[in-house]
Amino acid sequence: MSTTSLPVIVLGGSGYVAGEFLRLIAQHPRLRLGAAVSMSAAGQPIGKAFAHLGPVFATERFVSLDTAIERLADAPRWIAVSAAPHGASAPLVAQLLGAADAAGIQLTVVDASADFRFRSTAQYEEIYHAAHAAPHLLESFRCAVPEHLEEIDTPHAAQPGCFATAMLLSIVPLTAKGLSEPNFCVSAITGSTGAGGTPRETTHHPVRQSNVFAYQPLKHRHDPEVRVLSEAATRRSIELHFVPHSGPFARGIHATVFAPRATNDSPEQIRAAVADYYRNAAFVRVLEAPPRLKDVVGTNFANLSVDADAQTITVCCVIDNLVKGAAGGALQWVNRLLGWPETEGLMIAPPGWI
């Protein structure tokens, strides 16, 4: 297998998820940055938007989509990852794929927005209240948590949302192994980076610091996404009752999932069954003690714990919303689509004290 690095186009290049794409690409042994596309920051140094990446990308600047398309001629094989906002990603991806096809360039896309998470335009439009910009491409994308799909039958992939990733990692093994009834309640808390880089009231420091509050209870847009993707992974429909919370930290998600028991197995047997489900998953660890957020922040790992009493099973899951829940999960898909080891460039030790 060739180890020659492939160039990557990062779409939506100046947001938090794009910054994580750039950080992970910089340390991936088979990838190199080909173009970081930002419509608002074209021409500016990458280090201006991401000071921590300035030394790594000392000479690189954000470019327009047209410049990225011109660069396609520099190599016969490209990767594109999209961190563009929902609704904006699909037209960018469509334009890029069209240009690559016209030039005879092989291009693989992984999208971290919501634009290719649903195969039905009706589902997308019902949730996001806008017409899909590239419905002709939906069948060429498959969305799933990488651990929940053994084989992918499409040329491109989409990464589920960050909350959705944490919930699916918890819900799918319980449903697939018949450990719980398919009726789930979830309380999850996320860091402020989950709200994106545009300042708003709920991300303003005086509001967010030392504060916890719920938002969009029982009507968050990741709710239908989780139900669709859980059914795709298990062939069983579920009920979901989800309350998200904003937390006083920058990055990470802690999700607690509750479901009625469907087995008389002991808590240890239930935990072992979940661990068995993830026995070949390099990034998912099932622990005996409840997981701590700091143990995964900055990494592509997901830590889970499983407990049960006479009536209820509960799973706690922690992930980094920007890595496992976005850029890291997306690069897992890049590795799989290219036939590389799934862990390539993603076995990162957490900083621990942040």
Image (cartoon, rainbow, N blue to C red):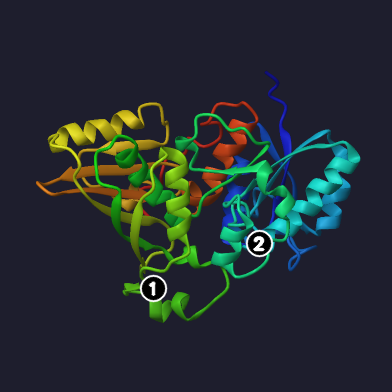
The residue depicted at 57 percent of the width and 68 percent of the height is 197
Considering the numbered disc 2 on the image, is that residue within a helix, a strand or a loop?
A: loop
Amino acid at pointer 2: Ser
* Residue 238 drawn at (x, y percent): 36, 50
Residue 204 picture location, percent across and down: 46, 78
User: Quadrant of the rendered structure where residue 33 is?
Assistant: top right
Q: Is residue 290 left or right of residue 208?
A: left
Q: Identify the element where label 1 is drawn.
A: loop
- Label 2 crowd bin: few (<14), some (14–19), many (20+), radius 10 Å: many
Residue placed under numbered mark 1 in the picture: 215
Which residue sits at x=15%, y=38%? 267
Q: Position of residue 253 (x, y in %)?
A: 38, 56
Q: 115 left or right of 9? A: left
Place residue 175 in its image quadrant. top left
Reply above or below: 256 against 24. below
The residue carrying pointer 1 sits among few (fewer than 14), some (14 to 19) or many (20 or more) residues within 10 Å by Cα, namely: few
> Which image quarter is the N terminus in?
top right
How many dots with numbers? 2
Residue 36 visible from this viewpoint: no
- Residue at figure coordinates x 88%, y 49% from the top left: 70
Identify residue type, mark 1.
Answer: Tyr
Q: Which of the two discs, 1 and 2, labels the residue nearer the N terminus?
A: 2
Q: Is residue 8 above or below residue 12?
A: above
Q: Nearer the viewer's eye, disc 1 or disc 2?
A: 1
Which residue corresponds to mark 2?
14
